[in-house]
């Protein structure tokens, strides 16, 4: 394989994992915009989507139905999370609410382990395993699925916020809560909706990714952390930024994994790929705290 | 608003009985495992050595939790990577004593210096920023450190870890029996409590409490907010590092596993469950979670699925405390105290 073909391979791998980070980041953004909360259970929705689809298939459902039902089920979980932990704490500080979502993530992770055991599970690919040829590089068709589904979700969420009344109402909550309430927007319903939407987006990512990477109960944490970084690197609150941040992290991870060994003459092993991606992301934030696409916020006096 | 974590002032004489009682219970709990005969068995076949081990772990966890409590309760910031500082202490100690033959205390000091440098580099730029930046940077640090522990095999032994760490001691005086080590850890916890108490009551502590009430007002009255936050962050990181060194010398073996994100979260739960804005709260939280974890692990030896309950249960404890007891377990004691005071003599100070 030539260097360009290798490069194509790494780019596709990087983008396809990156868009899932981006979807998690998008989920963070949706909830952050509506409530100011960082929902640390976000990555668990990815894990629940993947493992849920596998469990439903084991019950005998066809792949398509299992995938759709898993997304619906995780959406309901998202609604329940909001109802049971965020709604009862209207006066709590943001830090307290964030800590509550950490508790939720543990309950979901531990629950998945109790229910489905500690082993990694896998879904069959959506359209076979015959690689799609680009030059000499073979691309796993499932990775194309991941990218397509991510693109559709991002466009869908964007249009929802731009063109529907409900979407605009959620944005209004973010801009000015009390003003939104005064014009008759039901804040509670909007917050519920934002949790449902972000759970659905994350679960969708989990379902399409599981045939490529498998899914384990403990994997949610990685998605939370990387998705969160993606959202912040992109500029917290900016949904396009979250996706860009996710793709950037995925690309860094994949390119570092592929090229770090030849570039350093074997001094740095490919196991450092994630660490390198994280370090670069933190460096970006260190230099530009508002993120790549974020705007500097002035502190109110 | 009432400042939290203040020392009791006048008009609290009614609580002397309760306070004395509290000290007695604490002393009894600390001393009992030492006095037990070697042959004694609790139900479940738990012996003296096992109790001392749990006591040592509670102590180690308490030292970190007190530091994290200072950060969360007084500086109003949360770290999601304290297990990394704990790991930095443990690995520095292990590497220097095994590979360079350094004396344990010197290695511990080296760990403190390394951790403090990392904490300053991380905290100086982020603590000036608002919101979630410290949480995120500590999170990122935790992940990177965990990868290094696993990957830098030549230095850290990778997954397999490092064996043959010497016991803690100076020259011929070594802490190589469990009761001795237990006493040393209790002493370390006591010193940490005293230091934390002093810090909270000092100028710095007052500034920090003011900070927690209103950052803007504090800054406007001439307090260098970012500097105080950084100071507390570095102190809490250093305490975690010291605890890590103690852990390494106690286990005599370390691997990357105990220093991951899961433990960082457990530490946050300890602080929240006990009550962040107090010194004894995190200690109580450390005891609660350590014992809960041990009970589950022990029961899991007979009934395997019980061992898998730990994550769910820790999460449930965290959510329940946040929802029902937002100021932690120690607020129960406060409630009891206030209740008693009201019974004996209605305090004029209360409005």
Image (cartoon, rainbow, N blue to C red):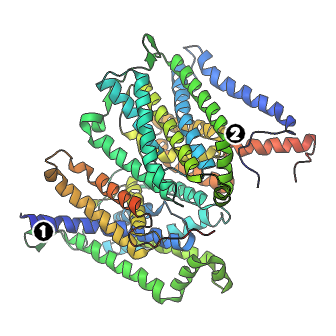
Q: Which mark is residue A138?
A: 1
* Subunit of label 1: A
Gap between marks 2 and 1 measured at Cα = 66 Å
Q: Is residue B341 left or right of residue A143?
A: right
Quick check: A247 above or below A121? below
Circle 2 packing at 10 Å, graded few (<14), some (14-19), many (20+), is some
Quadrant including the N terminus of chain B: bottom right
The correct choice, above or below, for A63 with respect to B348 in the image is: below
- Tell me the number on the disc at residue B118: none
Residue B117's spot in the image, x, y percent?
A: 42, 41
Mark toward the viewer: 2 or 1: 2
Measured along the vertical axis of the image, is residue A188 above or below residue B272?
below
* Disc 2 secondary structure class: helix
Furthest-front residue in view? B222
* Residue at 21% over, 47% down: A269
- Chain under label 2? B
SS at mark 1?
strand
Quarter of the image holding residue A147? Answer: bottom left
Q: Residue B183: percent from the left, percent from the top?
A: 56, 20
Q: Is residue A277 left or right of residue B171?
A: left
Is residue A268 visible in the rendered image? The answer is: yes
Quickly name the residue at label 2: B201
Q: Position of residue A184 (x, y in %)?
A: 66, 86
Q: Looking at the image, which residue is at 7% across and 69% down?
A: A136
In this view, B121 is above or below A25? above
């Amino acid at each position: 394989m030539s260097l360009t073909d290798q490069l194509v391979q790494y780019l596709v791998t990087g983008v396809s994992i990156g868009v899932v980070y981006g979807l998690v980041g998008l989920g963070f953004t949706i909830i952050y915009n509506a409530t100011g909360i960082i929902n640390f259970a976000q990555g668990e929705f990815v894990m629940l989507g993947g493992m849920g689809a596998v469990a439903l298939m084991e019950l005998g459902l066809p792949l398509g139905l299992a995938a759709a039902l898993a997304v619906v089920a995780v959406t309901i979980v998202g609604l329940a999370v909001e109802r049971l932990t965020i709604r009862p704490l209207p006066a709590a500080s943001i830090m307290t609410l964030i800590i509550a979502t950490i508790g939720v993530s543990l309950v979901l992770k531990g629950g998945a382990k109790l229910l489905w055991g500690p082993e990694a599970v896998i879904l069959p690919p959506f359209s076979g395993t015959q690689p799609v040829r680009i030059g000499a590089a073979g691309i796993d068709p499932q990775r194309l699925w991941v990218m397509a589904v991510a693109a559709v979700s991002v466009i869908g969420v964007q249009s929802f916020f731009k063109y529907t009344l409900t979407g605009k109402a959620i944005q209004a909550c973010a801009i000015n809560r009390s003003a939104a309430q005064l014009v008759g927007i039901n804040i509670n319903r909007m917050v519920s909706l934002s949790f449902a939407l972000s759970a659905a987006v994350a679960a969708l990512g989990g379902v399409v990714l599981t045939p490529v990477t498998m899914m384990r109960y403990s994997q949610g944490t990685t998605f939370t952390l990387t998705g969160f970084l993606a959202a912040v690197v992109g500029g917290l609150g900016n949904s396009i930024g979250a996706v860009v941040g996710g793709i950037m992290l995925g690309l860094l991870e994949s390119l570092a994994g592929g090229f770090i060994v030849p570039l350093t003459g074997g001094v740095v092993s490919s196991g450092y790929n994630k660490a390198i991606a994280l370090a670069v992301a933190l460096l970006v934030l260190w230099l530009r705290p508002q993120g790549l696409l974020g705007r500097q916020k002035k502190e109110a006096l | 608003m009432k400042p939290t974590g203040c020392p009791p002032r006048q008009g609290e004489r009614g609580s002397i009985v309760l306070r004395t009682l509290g000290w007695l219970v604490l002393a009894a709990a600390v001393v009992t495992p030492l006095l037990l005969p070697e042959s004694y068995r609790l139900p479940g076949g738990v012996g003296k050595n096992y109790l001392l081990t749990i006591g040592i772990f509670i102590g180690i966890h308490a030292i970190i939790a007190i530091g994290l409590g200072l950060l969360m309760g007084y500086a109003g910031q949360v770290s999601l990577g304290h297990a990394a500082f704990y790991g930095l202490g443990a690995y520095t100690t292990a590497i220097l004593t095994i590979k360079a033959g350094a004396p344990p205390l010197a290695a511990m000091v080296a760990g403190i210096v390394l951790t403090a440098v990392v904490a300053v580099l991380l905290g100086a730029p982020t603590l000036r920023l608002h919101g979630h930046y410290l949480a995120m940077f500590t999170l990122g640090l935790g992940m990177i450190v965990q990868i290094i522990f696993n990957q830098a095999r030549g230095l850290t032994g990778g997954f397999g870890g490092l064996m043959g760490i010497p016991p803690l001691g100076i020259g011929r005086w070594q802490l190589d029996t469990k009761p001795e080590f237990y006493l040393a850890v209790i002493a370390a916890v006591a010193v940490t409590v005293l230091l934390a108490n002093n810090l909270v009551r000092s100028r710095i502590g007052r500034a920090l409490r003011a900070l927690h009430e209103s950052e803007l007002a504090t800054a406007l009255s001439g307090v260098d907010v970012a500097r105080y936050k950084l100071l507390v962050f570095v102190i809490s990181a250093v305490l975690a590092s010291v605890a890590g060194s103690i852990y390494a010398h106690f286990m005599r073996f370390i691997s990357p596993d105990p220093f991951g994100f899961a433990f960082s979260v457990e530490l946050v739960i300890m602080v929240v469950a006990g009550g962040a804005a107090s010194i004894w709260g995190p200690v109580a939280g450390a005891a609660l979670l350590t014992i809960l974890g041990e009970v589950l692990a022990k029961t899991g030896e007979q009934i395997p699925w019980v061992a898998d309950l730990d994550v769910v249960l820790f999460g449930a404890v965290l959510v329940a405390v946040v929802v029902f007891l937002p100021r932690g377990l120690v607020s129960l004691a406060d409630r009891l105290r206030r209740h008693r005071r009201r019974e004996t003599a209605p305090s004029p100070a209360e409005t």
